[in-house]
Amino acid sequence: MAEGKFGTAFNCMDGRTQLPVYKYLSEKYGLDYVDMITEPGADRALTQGSHALLESLKAKASVSVNGHGSNIIAVVGHHDCAGYPVSKDEHIAQTKVAVNVVRGWGFPAEVIGLWVDENGQVHDIDGP
């Protein structure tokens, strides 16, 4: 197992979201590292992706959880997403569904939803 405290984020490939999510998770959960699993529109990838894509994402999360000991997994939606150009409300709704998809994989980790706004601020998304 790798040294240090790890978390995992299903994040968009959009570079504007990487640092804010890394910083937020590191500070809130006392993490040393955040394994980023990126896809254009990660919330959409987890809710509307092909079976093959979902299996690939699950396998990557498994490496983070089982290989690095990650015990927190974040699913991220964000403002102005080129990979999933829908409203904030739709992103939040899909992120909540995606959280449930990841929870269904049964990893021994807390799964949360996050929203990155137009100012790069990260917000928790409450509820299922």
Image (tube, rainbow, N blue to C red):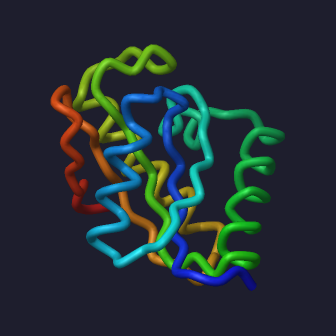
Which residue is drawn at the image coordinates 75% and 85% (left, top)?
Answer: 1
**Furthest-right residue in this view:** 52
List x then y, in percent, for residue 95: 39, 45
Which residue is drawn at the image coordinates 37% and 38% (left, top)?
Answer: 77
Quadrant of the image occupied by residue 94: top left
- From the viewer's perspective, tell me whether residue 82 is left or right of residue 101: left
- Depth check: give the residue in front, 73 or 54: 73
- From the viewer's perspective, tell me whether residue 89 is left or right of residue 67: left
List x then y, in percent, for residue 80: 31, 18
List x then y, in percent, for residue 116: 27, 39
Q: How many marks?
A: 0
- Relative to residue 114, is residue 105 depicted above or below? below
Q: Quadrant of the C terminus?
A: bottom left
- Relative to residue 61, is residue 76 depicted above or below? above
Which residue is drawn at the image coordinates 64% and 83% (left, top)?
Answer: 3
Which residue is drawn at the image coordinates 57% and 50% (left, top)?
Answer: 36
Quadrant of the image occupied by residue 70: bottom right
List x then y, in percent, for residue 5: 52, 80
- From the viewer's perspective, tell me whether residue 54 is left or right of residue 33: right
- From the viewer's perspective, tell me whether residue 110 is left or right of residue 124: right
- Depth check: give the residue in front, 46 or 65: 65
- Depth check: give the residue in front, 99 or 13: 13
